Image (cartoon, rainbow, N blue to C red):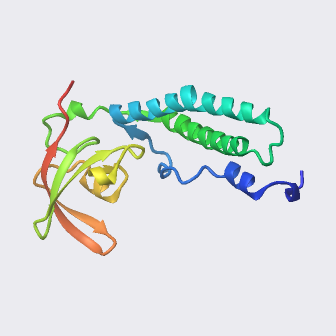
C-alpha cells in the first residue's frame, strides 16, 4: 500500500514504543524487588483482564454505529487499544526477563547490594538517603534510584565508612557511606 493513503498519526503510533522507561543496558538483567515485580504484574493483569476487554467492547459497539471516520468513540477507542497493546508488549518483555531479588536476605549487612537503603554524605556534610531499586520500579521523587544510575553504581559493594568518588556532570565529588539498611525478612 502506498504511503499516500495512510494517516501519519496512525503510522507514527504503530512504529514507536513510546517514551516509557529507559532501555536496559545490553546484556544485563532486569533486577526487581518482589514488590516491584508484583506491581508490574498487577498492571499487566489490570490491562489484559479489565481495560482491554472494556475498550474492545466500546470499539465494537462504535463500529456498529455506521460512519467510522467521524465516530469519536471508534477513533478514540482504536487509539486507546493501540496504547494498551503497546504497554502490554512492553510489560511482557520486561516481566519475561525480570530477575526478582529479595533485598531482605542482606538484612543486617553493612555492604551495599541491590535493594539497600543507603545514607551518604558529601564533602559539605550534606546527607542524602537513596534506595537502590530496579529500572522499572525506581521513583526519584521517593528517593529511589535505579541500580544502573551513577550514584548506585558508585555505592554498590561499598561498606559503611567507605569514601568513594561520585562522577557528576560538574566533576568528581567525594562521598562517604554513612549508613546501610535493608528491609526485615518477612
User: In the rendered view, would you say 4 is above or below 76?
Assistant: below
Q: Quadrant of residue 75?
A: top right
User: In the rendered view, would you say 36 is above or below 178?
Assistant: above
Q: Quadrant of residue 186?
A: top left
Q: Nearer the viewer, residue 11 or 53?
A: 53
Q: Position of residue 11 (x, y in %)?
A: 74, 53
In the current view of this chain or complex, which residue is farthest to the bottom? 170
Residue drawn at x 63%, y 42% is 80
Q: Nearer the viewer, residue 7 or 34?
A: 7
Residue 116 as seen in the image, left or right of residue 54? left
Residue drawn at x 13%, y 65% is 126
Residue drawn at x 55%, y 37% is 93
Residue 42 as seen in the image, left or right of residue 150? right
Q: Quadrant of residue 58?
A: top right
Q: Position of residue 42 (x, y in %)?
A: 44, 30
Residue drawn at x 65%, y 39% is 81
Q: Nearer the viewer, residue 8 or 149?
A: 8
User: In the rendered view, would you say 126 is above or below 68?
Assistant: below
Amino acid at each position: 500500500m502506498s504511503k499516500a493513503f495512510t494517516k501519519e498519526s496512525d503510522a507514527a503510533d504503530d512504529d514507536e514504543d513510546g517514551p516509557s522507561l529507559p532501555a536496559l543496558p545490553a546484556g544485563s538483567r532486569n533486577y526487581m524487588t518482589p514488590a516491584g515485580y508484583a506491581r508490574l504484574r498487577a498492571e499487566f493483569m489490570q490491562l489484559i483482564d479489565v481495560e482491554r476487554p472494556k475498550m474492545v467492547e466500546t470499539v465494537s459497539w462504535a463500529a456498529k454505529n455506521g460512519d467510522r471516520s467521524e465516530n469519536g468513540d471508534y477513533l478514540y477507542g482504536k487509539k486507546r487499544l493501540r496504547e494498551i497493546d503497546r504497554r502490554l508488549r512492553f510489560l511482557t518483555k520486561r516481566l519475561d526477563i525480570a530477575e526478582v531479588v529479595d533485598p531482605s536476605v542482606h538484612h543486617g549487612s553493612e555492604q551495599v547490594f541491590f535493594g539497600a537503603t543507603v545514607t551518604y554524605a558529601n564533602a559539605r556534610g550534606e546527607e542524602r538517603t537513596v534506595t537502590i531499586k530496579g529500572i522499572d520500579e525506581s521513583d526519584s521523587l521517593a528517593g529511589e534510584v535505579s541500580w544502573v544510575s551513577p550514584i548506585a553504581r558508585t555505592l554498590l559493594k561499598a561498606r559503611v565508612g567507605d569514601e568513594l568518588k561520585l562522577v557528576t556532570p560538574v566533576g568528581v565529588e567525594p562521598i562517604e557511606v554513612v549508613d546501610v539498611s535493608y528491609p526485615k525478612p518477612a
